[in-house]
Image: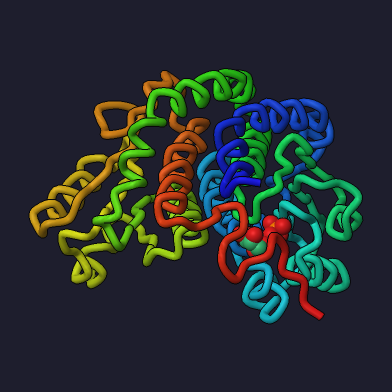
Amino acid sequence: MTFGQHTKKEILTQTEAWVGAIDEIVLKKQKILNINFSAYDQVIFTGCGSTYYLSLAAAALFQKQTGIICKAIPGGELLINPKLAYSNSNNLLVAISRSGTTTETIEAVQQFKSNKGGKVITISNYDNQPLTELSDLDICIAAGQETSVAQTRSFSSMFVASTALAMIASYKMDLFDLMRKLPEIGEKLIEDYHKYARESGENLNFDRFFYLGNGCRYGIACEANLKMKEMTQTHTEPYHFLEFRHGPKSMINEQSVVIGLLSTKARAYEEKVLEEMRELGGRTISIAENDADISFNSGLPEEIRTVLYLPVLQLMAFYRSMKKGLNPDKPKNLSSVVTLK
Ligand code: F1P
């Protein structure tokens, strides 16, 4: 088995899993429509590691689309401090887990149910697992299953499902239908920027990476940060875009890369931050719908194209890992699931 072949294949073929995600939501569409989301006081999203970061992105997107108060909380935090998350029984909990076997997430959901916190939706890639057994509505994308420890196709498949859930919950069926274009656009994006990802990833002159994003892009920035950390053991940090000026920019030098996940609405603010970091000697990489170092040119509305920020950044982490002689399939110190005794 050569190093990294699972990770590379899983990144390059992830748009197949996006098709699976959309198909699963079509299958569960009526059950989703039967949920009276606006009757809940709040929607809580939870997961661990990558799936906590997915929860951050999904909660921001869901609240923006539905107007319902949403929050994201790590599974371990929900387990240890449930009162920080909910104090009555009118909550909807969305538990996200690739494996469906992460102890903290399972125990947090079990506690939520015994506390009569409300109903539970699960989003995962493996069915008939302890987590899915606790679910009132189980969204499972088998096409997102993967061999590698670091989540890539699994994450993006669950995020596409989360995006589709938000579109249906906010009755934006036209936007949900447009999501069918994502896999083809994603495939072209990976093809168009594969060389760029390799060249950027293989440049070992850089020793620290900062990922900046606003709104639902902050959760994606956190995930891209974790990919680079897990696969390459490089110093990486995520921040909300404008937060970066308030101290962390002191870390900027010629070995730094600041990766900006640009939005449409706040782009002027965001580009100013990147310009300042270049003036401090750092390298910047911008990712956006258009006119960026990495441009989607998707033609899709902003609500449904957030997943497109990920693939090229996953590929950059993969190539840096390989250049450093590491095995991205099996990152140092990690296992694909954290189960506590
Ligand atoms: C959660 C998780 C991953 C992490 C690592 C260990 O797994 O913490 O997010 O990247 O692979 O497991 P899951 O609950 O999503 O299966």
Kindly give the residue lying farthest to the front in the view shown: 1
The residue at 43%/45% (across/down) is 319
- Residue closest to the eye, 56 or 67: 56
User: Residue 153 occupies which quadrant of the picture?
Assistant: top right
Q: Is residue 136 visible?
A: yes
| Coloring basis for residues | rainbow
Q: How many marks?
A: 0
- Residue closest to the eye, 264 or 193: 193
Q: Position of residue 146 (x, y in %)?
A: 70, 44
Kindly give the residue lying farthest to the left in the view shown: 279
Q: Quadrant of the C terminus?
A: bottom right
The residue at 45%/59% (across/down) is 232
The residue at 81%/47% (across/down) is 126
Q: Is residue 47 visible?
A: no
Q: Is residue 102 above or below residue 67?
A: below
- Residue closest to the eye, 300 or 102: 102
Q: Position of residue 43 (x, y in %)?
A: 66, 55
User: Residue 276 occupies which quadrant of the picture?
Assistant: bottom left
The residue at 55%/24% (across/down) is 182
> For this view, does 238 lie left or right of residue 60?
left
> For this view, does 204 lie left or right of residue 269?
right
Q: Position of residue 76 (x, y in %)?
A: 67, 74
Quadrant of picture, ligand 1 = bottom right
